């Protein structure tokens, strides 16, 4: 809508602004049976708190629910439910009414398709190490071949919470989604609380390895949020070299490593003062040379 103002600017004038509905559309191009889908409405010159009534419908007479809310910031977004049972070829749309202003609009129409079913979500390993390439897979029913989807990967954090760390585009092919993900721990393992720190400062009393699960996002829906993929655990390693004050290696010395989970491992340095340990809990370690009385932290 074009607005023109041609009166003088050195006086006070009353201007009447015309309210309107600019946009009413679904948030996705397809409505899946048994799921939810977003509705978006944009307005112009509509007062804060104005009433908005939205009614979901289908071309073949299905009731998709109603929303009675208020508009703020000249916009509204919400969700409507698509019924489990749909008729072939049916399309969904919704109507918008602003009763206080006498304004009406109708959304675009999108196809309603059978319910999506995601199953058999899995990693190809139960443990992951630095530099590993993991394969993630899931079976998908009710989605057209070559449809774009997203794999979302979550990592465990403090208090049992999980943080989204990666979002990877993928495609459905032959009713499957399969991708490869090259693992890299994205933070400093020294920031992982040790058993000792948890015992002293946290309600969580025991060390936990960082763990991961993934979900599959199709349009507005995210499948696998109950960790159906299973959890995969991060296992670390340590290569080190120990030198004395003169820069000479501690040759063939026995060592003890105090690990982040409160346990310990024993080993012996080689001729060059080097040691190597695999299958460690990620986090801070302390290396002790008991015969020399030396302590090294990391």
Image: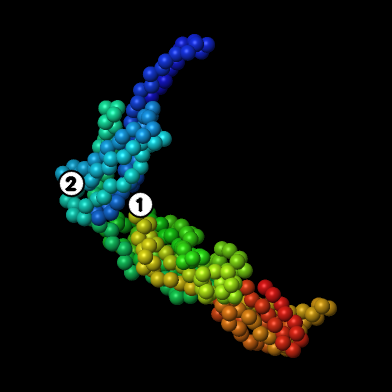
Q: Which mark is residue 220?
A: 1
Percent across and percent down for residue 2 are 40, 22
Whether 20 is drawn above or below 196: the answer is: above
Residue at coordinates 35% horizontally, 60% vertically from top-left? 223
Q: Is residue 71 left or right of residue 5?
A: left
Secondary-structure class at tag 1 = loop
Q: Quadrant of residue 23?
A: top left
Identify which residue is drawn at 38% across, 62% down.
225
User: Which residue is painted at 19% across and 52% down in the image?
Assistant: 86
Residue 274 figure quarter: bottom right
Asked whether disc 2 touches disc 1, contact meaning CB atoms under 8 Å apart, the reply is no
In the displayed structure, 131 sits above or below 249; it is above
Helix, strand, or loop for circle 2? loop
For the residues labelled 2 and 1, the Cα–Cα distance comes to 21 Å
In the rendered image, the residue lying farthest to the right is 246
Type of colouring? rainbow
Q: Residues within 10 Å of mark 2 (few under 14, many from 20)?
A: some
The answer to whether residue 220 shows anywhere in this view is yes
Q: Is residue 250 above or below residue 153?
A: below
Confirm whether residue 270 shows in the render: no
Q: In front here: 180 or 86? A: 86
- Please, is residue 290 above or below residue 209 in the view? below
In the image, 51 versus 28, the foreground residue is 51
In which quarter of the view is residue 217 placed? bottom left
Q: Judge left or right: residue 13 versus residue 121.
A: right
Residue 249 rendering spot, x and y as whole percentages: 77, 82
Residue that appears at 36% across and 68% down: 228
Q: Position of residue 239 (x, y in %)?
A: 65, 77
Disc 2 marks which residue?
A: 62
């Amino acid at each position: 809508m074009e607005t023109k103002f041609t009166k003088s600017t050195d006086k006070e004038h009353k201007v009447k602004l015309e309210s309107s509905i600019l946009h009413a559309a679904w948030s996705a191009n397809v409505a899946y049976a048994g799921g939810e889908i977003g509705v978006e409405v944009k307005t112009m010159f509509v007062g804060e708190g104005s009433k908005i009534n939205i009614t979901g419908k289908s071309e073949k007479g299905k009731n998709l629910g109603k929303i009675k809310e208020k508009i703020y910031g000249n916009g509204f977004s919400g969700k409507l439910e698509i019924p489990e049972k749909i008729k072939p070829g049916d399309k969904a749309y919704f109507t918008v009414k602003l009763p206080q202003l006498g304004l009406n609009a109708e959304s675009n129409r999108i196809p309603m398709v059978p319910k999506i079913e995601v199953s058999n979500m899995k990693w190809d390993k139960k443990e992951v190490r630095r530099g590993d390439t993991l394969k993630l897979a899931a079976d998908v029913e009710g989605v057209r071949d070559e449809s774009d989807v997203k794999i979302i990967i979550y990592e465990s954090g403090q208090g049992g919470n999980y943080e989204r760390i990666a979002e990877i585009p993928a495609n459905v092919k032959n009713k499957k989604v399969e991708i490869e993900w090259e693992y890299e721990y994205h933070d400093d393992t020294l920031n992982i609380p040790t058993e000792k720190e948890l015992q002293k400062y946290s309600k969580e009393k025991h060390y936990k390895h960082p763990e991961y699960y993934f979900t599959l996002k199709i349009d507005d829906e995210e499948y696998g949020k109950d960790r159906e993929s299973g959890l995969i655990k991060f296992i670390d390693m340590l290569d080190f070299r120990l030198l004395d004050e003169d820069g000479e290696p501690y040759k063939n010395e026995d060592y003890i490593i105090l690990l982040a989970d409160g346990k310990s491992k024993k080993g012996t340095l080689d001729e060059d003062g080097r040691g190597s340990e695999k299958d460690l809990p990620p986090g801070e370690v302390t290396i002790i040379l008991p015969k020399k009385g030396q302590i090294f932290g990391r």
